[in-house]
């Protein structure tokens, strides 16, 4: 009986794409909820200040979103390079 060997794909971009989409949805919905909480409280209230600071933090995180995507794509490119030039076929430990 012959054993079927499934070929490994080079890189699976599904996890990266799903992670980026989920991260964008969470940041967008979280910022909307925090702004709604902030707007329903008075300006001298602690809840107003807390929600405002948290919304500002999420907005700052959104500014870093482009960099996070670039780092993710760079990680995919590096994994392709390591897979192409790596020593995965040899047994034993690698020495650097």
Image (tube, rainbow, N blue to C red):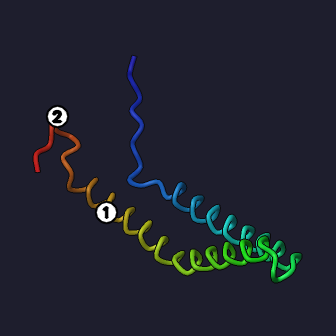
Name the image quarter holding residue 6: top left
Q: Label 2's element?
A: loop
Give the residue pinned by disc 1: 78
Q: Residues within 10 Å of mark 2 (few under 14, many from 20)?
A: few
Q: Nearer the viewer, residue 3 or 69?
A: 69
Name the image quarter holding residue 60: bottom right
Cα separation between marks 2 and 1 = 22 Å
Q: Nearer the viewer, residue 26 or 60?
A: 60
Give the residue pinned by disc 2: 91
Q: Nearer the viewer, residue 29 or 4?
A: 29
> Residue 92's spot in the image, x, y percent?
15, 34
Q: Residues within 10 Å of mark 1 (few under 14, many from 20)?
A: few
Residue 8 vs residue 60: left or right? left
> Residue 95's spot in the image, x, y percent?
10, 45
Q: Label 1's element?
A: helix
- Residue at 11 percent across and 51 percent down: it is 96
């Amino acid at each position: 009986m012959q054993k079927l060997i499934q070929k490994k794909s080079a890189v699976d971009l599904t996890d990266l794409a799903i992670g980026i989409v989920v991260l964008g949805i969470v940041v967008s919905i979280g910022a909307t909820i925090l702004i709604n909480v902030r707007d329903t409280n008075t300006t001298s209230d602690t809840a107003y200040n807390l929600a405002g600071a948290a919304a500002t933090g999420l907005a700052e995180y959104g500014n870093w979103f482009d960099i996070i995507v670039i780092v993710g794509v760079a990680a995919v490119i590096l994994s392709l390079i390591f897979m192409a030039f790596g020593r995965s076929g040899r047994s034993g430990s690698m020495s650097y």
